[in-house]
Amino acid sequence: MTEVPALELRRITKRFGTLVANDAVDFELRRGEIHALLGENGAGKSTLMNVLYGLHQPDEGEILLDGKPVEINSPREAIALGIGMVHQHFMLVPVMTVAENLVLGAEPRSGPLLDYKSAAERVRELSRRYGLAVDPDARVEDLGVGSQQRVEILRALFRGAKVLVLDEPTAVLTAQEAQDLFKVLRGLTEQGTSVVFISHKLNEVLDIADRVTVLRRGEKIDTVPTEGATERSLARLMVGRDVLLRVEKPEHRPGEPLLRVEDLSARDDRGLPAVRGVTFEVRAGEIVGLAGVDANGQSELIETIVGLRKPDAGTVTIDGRDVTHLGPRETLAAGISHIAEDRHRRGLVLEFDLAENIGLRFYRNMAKMGWLSPRKLAAKARGLLREFDVRGGDADTRAGSLSGGNQQKVVIARELNADPKVIIAAQPTRGLDVGAIEFVHRRLVEERDAGRGVLLVSLELEEIRSLSDRVLVMYEGEIVAELPPSSSEEDFGMAMTGGKVEVS
Amino acid sequence: MSATPDDELPPDATVAAKLSAYLRGGGIITPLITVVVAFLFGGLVVLATGHNPISTYGAIFDGTGLNWLFPWTSSTEREIAALNLQQTLLRTAPLILAGLAVAFAFRCGLFNIGGQGQYIVGSILALWIGVSFENMPAFLHILLAIIGGALAGAVWAGIAGALKAVAGTNEVISTIMLNWIAIWIGVWLFNRGGPLQNTNPQQQDVPVSDDIVEGAKLPVFWGDPILQGLHIGIFIALAAVLVFWVILHRTVLGYEVRAVGYNPDAAAAAGISVARNYIVVMAICGAFAGLAGVIDVLGWQFRIATNDIRINDVGFTAIAVALLGRNTAIGVVFSALLFGALITGTSVRNLDPTIFEPALATNLTLVIQGLVVLLVSTDLLVVYLWRLRRRRLSSRKAVAA
C-alpha cells in the first residue's frame, strides 16, 4: 500500500552565506501522522520548517503537497495551501477576544460591523469538533499559556490547515498542559490532520510521535518509527555520541546552611501577595529543588532573595550575613550567583559582546579609578569561553547572535566564575538541547560537590527529581511540601496543585 | 523578547542580515540613504516652487563654503568660500554639542528632548558671568563661564533625570516642560525691567542684555573677529566628542550607561543602579547642551535678546543631528556638519538670490530636517524592502531553474 504522503520535502538545501543550514534534507509526512523533527539547537529544524512555510526560499530541492510539486513564496501562500504553523512565540492580539483573534483577516461581517455572534459560533463549532476547550469570549491576555496555544492551533485549523507545524510547542507548557496538548494533537490526527512536531525533548517525542526524523548539523540523519526507539537511541542519533541522560552524582554531604530564608513575604508587580511566609534553607553541598507550576511565586521569591524586589516581611541570610534589605549589587557580592530564568531579559545584554556580558559580574573589580579596559575584559572572557566550551563566537561576538545553549553557557560561565557560596539556578536548561543540558547538570553537581549550595528552580519535574537532594514544592506563594526526589510523580503532582501529600 | 529570527542568522549571511548588523553597529548605509531620500524630496519641493533643484542645490552648496575644500576653486571664490565655511563651522559647533546631549541620553535608553532648555540655561549663565567680573583675566573668565554654563545645563537636565529616577516621570514630558520653563525664565530675565536687561540708559526700551566684556569672548582663530570669524568653540565641541566616546567605551560609567540603555532589567540584575545612571546621564547630557549655549554666547552672539531665546532652535535641530548620526560620536560630528552647512547655505546672506529666494530656502532646510527625522525611524522599512527584493530575485531564480 503506497499512499501518497500529505507532504514531501525532497533534497531541500538552504544556505546562509557559507553556512549550510539544510543539506539535501528529505522529509515525508503521511496523512494523519504525528511526525517529530528532532535535533539540537542549530540543527536546521526551524530553517526546514521556515522553508515549508514560505519564510525562506530553498536553494535547491522541491516541496510536494499531496504528490504535487508546489512553490511557496510567503506564509500567505503556505496558508492557502493548507499549511498551518504555531510558533513558539504566539502571534495573538492580547486585548482581543479569542473569537476576534481567530477571525482576524477574514472577519464575518454584518454591514460595516464585525458579526461577533457568528464569529463566536464558528469558534465554538471548531473547538467542539476538535475537542479544543476554549472560551470564545475570553480575552487572550487573560488566558494561560496553554490556552493561548490552543487558540493558535484553532486559528491554523480555522484557516483550513491540513498540515500543522508546531515549533517546540511544549517549551512554554507545564507537564499537565503538555499532556492536554498531546490529547488534542491525537484528536486532530484522527480527523486526518497531519502534524509536524519540532522538539528536542526525547521523552515527549517518544510519547506523542509516530515517526521521528533526526537532523544534525543541517543533515538528515535518519527517520525511524518511535516504536522500538528509546531515549538513548534517539539521543545518540541526535548528538552523534552516547549521552548521559540521568545525572550521575555521588551521595551528598550537606554542611553549614549557606542560604537561609525566613518567613519571607513579597508582592508581585500588581501589588498582590506572591510570596507568603516562605521559610527554607540551602546548605553547603546540597541541591535543593524548588518545584511548582509556573507563576506560583517562584520568580518573585528569587527576585526577593537577590534584592531585585523589596520584601514585605522576613529575612534573607547568606552565610550568616543579613542581606534582606540590600540591593542586588551588595547581595550578589555577599556570595550569590544568579542564573536568571529568562536569559534574554535578565541574564544577558544581547547587544553587548560576550566580553562585556561576562564583565557584568566583574567590571567593577577590573576597573581602575573608573577606567575600564576592553582589552582586559576580553582577556578574561576568552579564558572563560574556552573553559566552558562556548561555540559560535569569540569575546567580540554579539551575545544575541549565539544559539540559546551557548548563550546559557556564557551566563553560567560568568556566574560560576564569581566564586559564589550559593547558586540560584532558575530554569537553567530552558530551551537547551540534550548536549547542553548534560553540561549544565554536570556543572551544577560539580559545584555542589565543591561545597556550594544550589537552589534549583525549574518547571521540569524530571530535572528537579534527577538533580535535587531535597525538593520543596511551591504553591500559591507558599512552600506546601518537602519531598524526597524519589517520591512519585503523582505525589509531586498533588503537591504542586495544592493537594495534600502524605510524606513517607 | 528582543531576539528575532534575524538574530539567529549567521553574521555573514544575507545582505539583509549584514545590513541589520551595520545598523546595530551604527553603520553608515541607512543614514546615507536617509539623507539622499530627504534631499530628493527637498528637490521635489524646489521643483514645485518652479525652480531648478540641481542649480538650487548647487547654490546652497556654494553658500556653505564647502567648496573651499576643492583645489579647483579660484582664489577670489576661495576668499568668499572661507567666509562661508567659517559660518558653517560656527553653526556646526553648537549642533555637535547639543547633538551629543541627545545622543548620550539615547545610549542610556532615554529620549532627551530638553536640549533646547539646557542650551538656554547654559547660555544664560555664560552671559551672566560674561557681563560680570569685568576685571578678571581673560582665560579664567572664559573658563569660569564654561564651567558655569555646563553646570547650569547639568542641573537643568539633572532635574528630569532625578524625576525619572525617583518618581518614574517620563523624561520626554519633563524635558519638554523644562524647555518652556527655561524659555520663559530667559524672556523674563532680558525683558524690559528684567534683572539682566542692559544697563545702557539709551537702550532701556530694548529687551536685550549688555554685551559680555572683551575678555570673556572666545578667541577667533580663522577669519576676522569683526566679521564673525571662526572662534575656538569648534575645538571645544570636538573635544567633547572625544570625551563622549571615551566615557562610553573606556569607563565604568559608560559601560553601565550602555548596559542600562540596551537592557535595564539585565543591568539591574547585575547590580547596576538604573536610577542613579538616569540622573548621572541626564546631568552629563545637560552639560553638553549647556556648553553649546556657552560657546554661542562667548563665541559670536555676545548678548542675548528675548527674541533670540524664542527663535533659537539649536536644541531641537540637535535631535535630528543625533538621530541621523545614529547616536555615535563620529556620526554626530558629520550630521552636525550637514545641518550646520544646510542652515548656512540656505541663509539669506549666503544663497544666490537669482537662483532661489533665500526666504524660501530657510524653509527648505526645515523641510529637509523634518524629513530626516521622519526617515531615520524607517530603518526597518529599508531592511524590509531589501529583503523583499531578495526574496523576489531568489524565487525568480527558482522558477528559472
Image: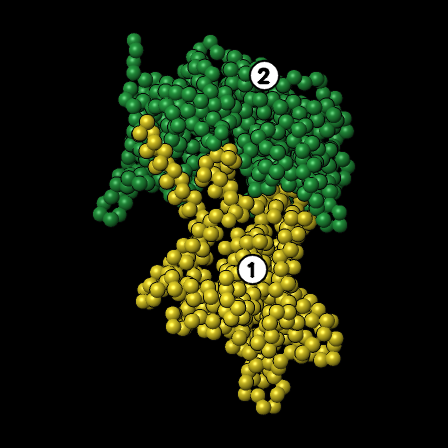
Colour of chain A, in one word, is green
**Residue A10 location (% of width, % of height):** 37, 20
Q: Residue at x 48, y 52 (%)?
A: B31
Query: 10 Å neighbourhood of mark 1: few (<14), some, or many (≥20)?
Result: many
Q: To which quarter of the image does residue A15 belong?
A: top left
Q: Mark 1, chain letter?
A: B
Outermost residue, bottom side: B202
Q: Which mark is residue B99?
A: 1
Above or below, A6 against B226 in this view is: above
**Residue B354 location (% of width, % of height):** 38, 72
**Residue B16 location (% of width, % of height):** 45, 40
Residue B177 visible in image: no
Tag 2 and tag 1 share a subunit: no
Q: Mark 2, chain letter?
A: A
Query: 10 Å neighbourhood of mark 2: few (<14), some, or many (≥20)?
Result: some
- Which quadrant: the C terminus of chain A? top right
Q: Residue at x 72, y 78 (%)?
A: B133
Q: Residue at x 47, y 20 (%)?
A: A219
Task: Compare residues A292 and A355 and report the one nearer the observer.
Answer: A355
Above or below, A26 against A276 in this view is: above
Residue wearing tag 2: A243
Q: Considering the numbered disc 1 on the image, is that residue within a helix, a strand or a loop?
A: helix
Chain rendered yellow: B
